[in-house]
Each structure stands twice: as C-alpha cells, then as structure tokens.
Amino acid sequence: MTQNDALAAYLGPELFERLEWHRLTPQQRDAILSVFRVGLGAGAQSGAVSTIDAVLADGKVLICEDGSHWQACERDDAELIEDWGAGALVAIHRQLVYRLDPYQAAEVELLRL
C-alpha cells in the first residue's frame, strides 16, 4: 500500500477525489502528507484535513466542518482566510492552516469555546 493509497483509505473516496491529488504539486502533496505523518489520532491540533464551514469576523474566526474553531493570529492571516471563504479545503498542522489549492498558509490558534 502506498502513502497515496493509505491517505485515500483514511479520507474516503469523496474527500480524496476533492483533493485532485493528480493536479497537486510535489510541495502541496508533501504538505498534506506531513499532516498525517505527525499523528492522525491526536485530533485537529496535530493534523487534520477539513473543509471550511464558515468564516466570521472579517476572517478572524475560522470554523471547520469537523467542528473545530480557529482564530487568525494576525490581520494578514485573517485577510487570507476571509479570501478563502466557506468551502475551501484546508489542512491544519502546528497552528498553521494551509489552503491546498492554491497553496497558502495562515497562522491560527485553536479557539476553546
């Protein structure tokens, strides 16, 4: 089983198809795979791929479909997140949220409500 096969099995065919893996650059693929190498069982703080469910407060608050809530650390980060909007596919790893296509990153903190 290759890393691609393992990732496809973990994510399920629908989400893996949405990644459009064949279109991603090696840098984008490595970023996604690094999220899963760190620790799949540790939750969103250690690594998760999710779809943005909502962006609030001019990009300062990001809510993912997995129910996690994140706060942008800087105004530049909030502007990026606001531009991404709901429906964007992101990976969260070590207080960075990565938009996967096009590849961009913003610094975030987990919000505990």
Image: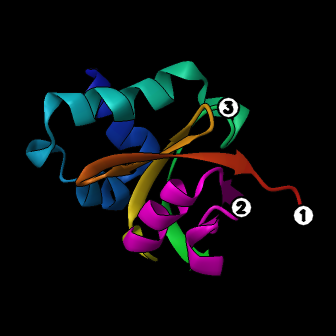
For image coordinates 62% across by 38% down, the residue present is: 95
- Which residue type carries mark 3? Gly
**107 left or right of 88 in image:** right
**22 left or right of 83 in image:** left
Residue 85 to residue 23: above or below: below
Q: Which residues are magenta?
A: 57-83
What numbered label is drawn on residue 69? 2
Give the residue at mark 3. 41
- Residue 50: x, y in percent? 50, 56
Quadrant into which the N terminus falls:
top left
- Nearer the observer, disc 3 or disc 1? 1
For image coordinates 42% across by 61% down, the residue present is: 80
Between marks 3 and 1, how big is the CA–CA gap?
Answer: 22 Å
* Marks 1 and 2 close (CB-CB < 8 Å): yes
- Residue 23: x, y in percent? 9, 47
Give the residue at mark 1. 113
Mark 1 element type: loop
* Marks 2 and 3 close (CB-CB < 8 Å): no
* Marks 3 and 1 close (CB-CB < 8 Å): no
Residue 72 on the magenta segment? yes
For image coordinates 63% across by 48% down, the residue present is: 108
Could you say which is closer to the camera, residue 65 or residue 15? 65
